[in-house]
Image (tube, rainbow, N blue to C red):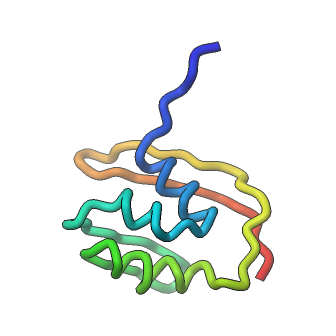
Amino acid sequence: MPATETTLGERFARSVLAKDWTSVAELLDANIDFRGLTPGKQWEAHAPDAVVDGILKRWFEPSDQIYAVLAVTSDRVVDRGRVVYRARIRS
């Protein structure tokens, strides 16, 4: 069975779900244009530290236990990367 290549979006999602903030920051471009959607709120940041500290650490608190990764997919939309992930989390 041939090995499948892991995309940058998939590596990002898996690092987020592992709460490996150092890896997340290393995967992000210094000039990132991050946009995220959650119910009732749009999120934007333009630097790796702002994405990690200002957004992701608010989405995933230290007490949250991510115990199952259900799906990770990524693709391109015109010139943008897109990643979608689902996980089971205990708060």
**The quarter of the displayed image where residue 63 is located:** bottom right
Nearer the observer, 86 or 23? 23
Residue drawn at x 45%, y 63% is 24
Q: Is residue 15 above or below residue 35?
A: above
Residue lying at the far front in this picture: please name it.
22
Residue drawn at x 70%, y 61% is 87
Residue drawn at x 43%, y 76% is 52
Q: Position of residue 68 (x, y in %)?
A: 77, 58
**The quarter of the displayed image where residue 58 is located:** bottom right
Residue lying at the far top in this picture: please name it.
1
Residue drawn at x 25%, y 45% is 78
User: In the image, 48: left or right of 1?
Assistant: left
Q: Is residue 14 above or below residue 66?
A: above
User: In the image, 20: left or right of 80?
Assistant: right
Q: Number of marks in the image?
A: 0
Q: Is residue 41 above or below residue 76?
A: below
**Quadrant including the N terminus:** top right
Q: Position of residue 72 (x, y in %)?
A: 59, 49
Q: Position of residue 16 (x, y in %)?
A: 55, 64
**Quadrant including the C terminus:** bottom right
User: In the image, 12: left or right of 85?
Assistant: left
Nearer the observer, 67 or 83? 67
